[in-house]
Image: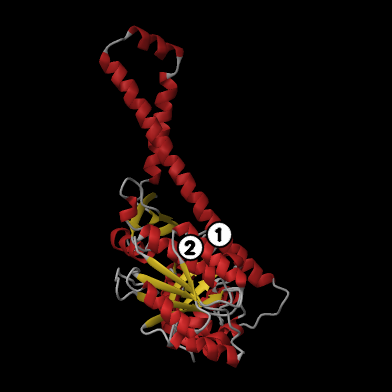
Amino acid sequence: MKIKKFTAPTELEAIEKIRQELGTEALVINVRKTQPRGLFAFLRKPAVEVTAAYDDGSDKEVLEDLARAESQAKIAATPQAAAVAAKNSDFESMANAAQLEAQIAEKDDRIKMLSDMLLTTGDMLSRAQSQMSVARQSPVERERIYQNNLLQIFYDTLVQNQVSPHIAQEILDDLDNDQLKSKLDINFIVKVVYNSLVKLIGSPSGLLAEPSKGNPQKFAFIGPTGVGKTTTIAKLTADLCLNRGMDVGLITADTYRIAAIEQLKTYGDILGIEVGVAYKPEDLEQSIDDNKNICDIILIDTAGRSHKNVENLAELSEFIKIVPDVEVFLVLSLTTKYEDMLGIVDSFSQIADFKIIFTKMDETDSLGAIVNICHQTGKKLSYITFGQNVPDDIKTVAPGEVAMRLLGLGEED
């Protein structure tokens, strides 16, 4: 068994490289995001490094080689061998000793590599067995959907992670037929379910902005109270300024909370950006006009609105309508109940079309709502946030990562 690392812009591209080079039997044992380093790091984008294990039939040979090397090392370490070495001072003897030492070190490294890989694989297996145990021993009587035990375990895992039961069934029902019975092993089911989840989530996209002074692109952020709109805007602003070299304009229409204005102004001061305040739609229009010749992009914060308050939503709509060609993002917290999320998406859809940003991933273990919302609303996703650190704790939604976590195979935080 050997391991090899693959690097690509996204996790899916790295996995595709693994599939093409090592085949479908290769095992992914680690996924991590890597940051560019070096003098010109700011010019390069982050990448994803995926570590895969594959069987080349050499493990037995490695162990045999190691045993021989250790045997030779023991002989070389005897007093008699030491005496001979002391008497024999020619370069050939020294070279052989150095070569033997290097071989032993190399075998040690390979054995450690195998050991680490086994520990990682064992950890994943342990987690899967734990989930199966919980499914069997739960005091709540579970409705059995599938006669096939493997399909039932995958169904229970998805539902435990808050994927709606009817969506879990849609994913698994195609596997529940006589023609596929001979193929229903864990690897086959994982591949099918993983691909189905990734397809459901779709292809998220971030702020597709290019420098454009004189006609800056405008993005507005809407959503309920307390979901983290202002912090999300601060993270995006820092990324646009520091990593993409753009001139950003900030405007807040959240005049209901004094703290919101001060919070955004604090971030603006740190980044050297003046924050405009819009108390009414006409103020917003004027602020945009003031910034259009000096900014590449303008981000607009709005007041949090209850999706049940028709009057407040109508007021928010006036702010959005006054901005021509604005792209809107609805910010949702993953800690919100799924049923409430559906109501929020439905109510805010009456104001504008939008992409969705999910926040507070670090405050929940269940990501099923992401799949549910995509399935039920057809809305496109954008970013996901997972902490308060600015600008680090935000990234574009990674469908593969979400799918792995829903299958219980993702990295534990």
Q: Going by the image, does 8 lie left or right of 239? A: left
Q: Position of residue 151 (x, y in %)?
A: 53, 77
Residues at marks 1 and 2, CA–CA distance in whole angstroms: 34 Å
Which mark is nearer the camera, 1 or 2?
A: 2
The quarter of the displayed image where residue 148 is located? bottom right
Q: Residues within 10 Å of mark 2 (few under 14, many from 20)?
A: some
Q: Secondary structure at mark 1?
A: loop
Q: Is residue 259 visible?
A: yes
> Image point 53% across, 74% down: which residue?
150
- In the image, residue 248 above or below residue 339: above
* Residue for badge 2: 268
Q: Going by the image, does 349 lie left or right of 22? A: right
Q: Position of residue 90 (x, y in %)?
A: 27, 12
The quarter of the displayed image where residue 94 is located? top left
Q: Earlier in the sequence, mark 1 or mark 2?
A: 2
Q: Which mark is residue 384?
A: none
Quadrant of the rendering where the C terminus is positioned: bottom right
Q: Amino acid at mark 2?
A: Gly
The number of discs equals 2
* Residue for badge 1: 412
Q: Are marks 1 and 2 in contact (CB under 8 Å)?
A: no
The quarter of the displayed image where residue 183 is located? bottom left
Q: Is residue 185 visible?
A: no
